[in-house]
Image (spheres, rainbow, N blue to C red):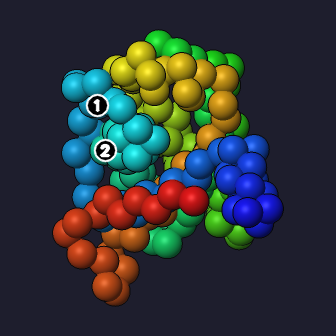
């Protein structure tokens, strides 16, 4: 029982983490009410359009931390917490702009009242990974995992 409590407490403190892999883009913000963390991550994934191929690097990963309020608006500024080491400054900037645009495109998010109360003020991170043109990349580009 104690071990289970520690795992749950750790998950609540650290918050959810999602990962998105992208090979193509749709850029569609959510229109129906979102009712779970997975819905939020899915909406943010669908809004992401990676930088053009000439301003990108296959395999690049970028992680951003954001906080939403009850009405689904971003609180404060998104914070980039990771980008693949060795990424040149111009490519880094292109990925940061593409993620910032995705967040702008998707917010405010249509959260249900219950989800709005649950997520309000809780920072969470989402990792985007550009897998366009990589071996094994398939057409189902949105692969989400939460922990």
The C terminus sits in image quarter: bottom right
Residue 81 locus on image (x, y percent): 72, 49
Q: Is residue 106 visible?
A: yes
Position of 58 compared to 61: left or right? left
Residue 76 locus on image (x, y percent): 68, 20
Residue 77 locus on image (x, y percent): 67, 25
Question: Do the residues bearing badges 1 and 2 touch, measured as CB atoms within 8 Å?
Answer: yes
Residue at the spot of label 1: 29
Residue at the spot of label 2: 46
Tell me what residue is drawn at x 66 percent, y 58 percent.
Answer: 83
Tell me what residue is drawn at x 24 percent, y 75 percent.
Answer: 138
Q: Is residue 48 visible?
A: no
Name the one closer to the observer, 142 or 17: 17
At mark 1, the secondary structure is: loop
Position of 119 compared to 37: left or right? right
Name the one closer to the observer, 146 or 24: 146
Tell me what residue is drawn at x 47 percent, y 13 percent.
Answer: 71
Position of 115 compared to 82: left or right? left
């Amino acid at each position: 029982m104690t071990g289970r409590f520690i795992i749950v407490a750790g998950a609540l403190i650290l918050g959810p983490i999602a990962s998105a892999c992208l090979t193509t883009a749709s850029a569609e913000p959510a229109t129906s009410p979102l009712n779970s963390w997975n819905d939020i991550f899915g909406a943010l994934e669908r809004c992401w359009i990676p930088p053009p191929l000439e301003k990108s690097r296959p395999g690049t990963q970028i992680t951003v931390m954001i906080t939403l309020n009850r009405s689904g608006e971003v609180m404060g500024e998104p914070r980039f917490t990771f980008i693949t080491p060795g990424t040149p400054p111009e490519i880094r900037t292109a990925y940061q702009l593409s993620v910032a645009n995705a967040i702008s495109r998707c917010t405010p998010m249509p959260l249900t009242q219950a989800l709005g109360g649950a997520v309000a003020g809780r920072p969470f991170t989402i990792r985007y990974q550009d897998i366009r043109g990589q071996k094994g990349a398939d057409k189902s580009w949105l692969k989400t995992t939460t922990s």
